[in-house]
Amino acid sequence: MGPHKGQQFRHTPAFILLFLAQSDAYGGTLLTRLENELPAYRSDSAIIYRTLQSLEEEGAVASYWEHESSGPPKKWYRITAAGHQRLRELRDDIRARQQNLAYFLQTYETMFGRES
């Protein structure tokens, strides 16, 4: 049984903001990066675009249209100052969760061994 559906996508905003802090991107690029760089992470384009819309509504990202020589225009996203602040808050939350998970693993391995 996999993670609870809500938990599966809990950190999507954190990864999107992290990627946008590196460079502007459009939705398809963000989905590809999530799939390639986080093999245990499962997402889809609907989740990405809903998250981007939510981040834009709260002012963490801004969008603009890029017209390329071939194909339709693409909606690109960039992180804002508010997005950088949100990214720091998400880092603090993830750090706290990581400490809790490390405690769980250490306790489990002490009780049952690493390979059980």
Image (cartoon, helix red, strand yellow):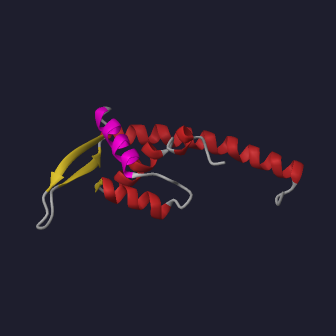
**Residue appearing at x 86%, y 56% in the figure:** 113
Is 47 part of what is drawn in magenta? Answer: yes
Position of residue 113 in the picture relative to residue 21 (left or right):
right
Most foreground residue, 87 or 30: 30
**Residue 33 in which image quadrant:** bottom left
Q: Residue at x 29, y 56 (%)?
A: 25
Q: Is residue 74 above or below residue 99?
A: below
Q: Residue at x 59, y 40 (%)?
A: 4
The rendered magenta stretch, by its main secondary structure, is classed as helix
Residue found 88% across the figure and 51% down from its top: 112
Q: Nearer the viewer, residue 98 or 40?
A: 40
The image position of residue 17, as x and y in percent, is 39, 47
> Which quarter of the rendered picture does the C terminus lie within?
bottom right
The residue segment tinted magenta is 45-57
Nearest to the observer: residue 72 or residue 29: 72
Q: Position of residue 50 (x, y in %)?
A: 35, 41
- Does 1 sit left or right of 10 as displayed? right
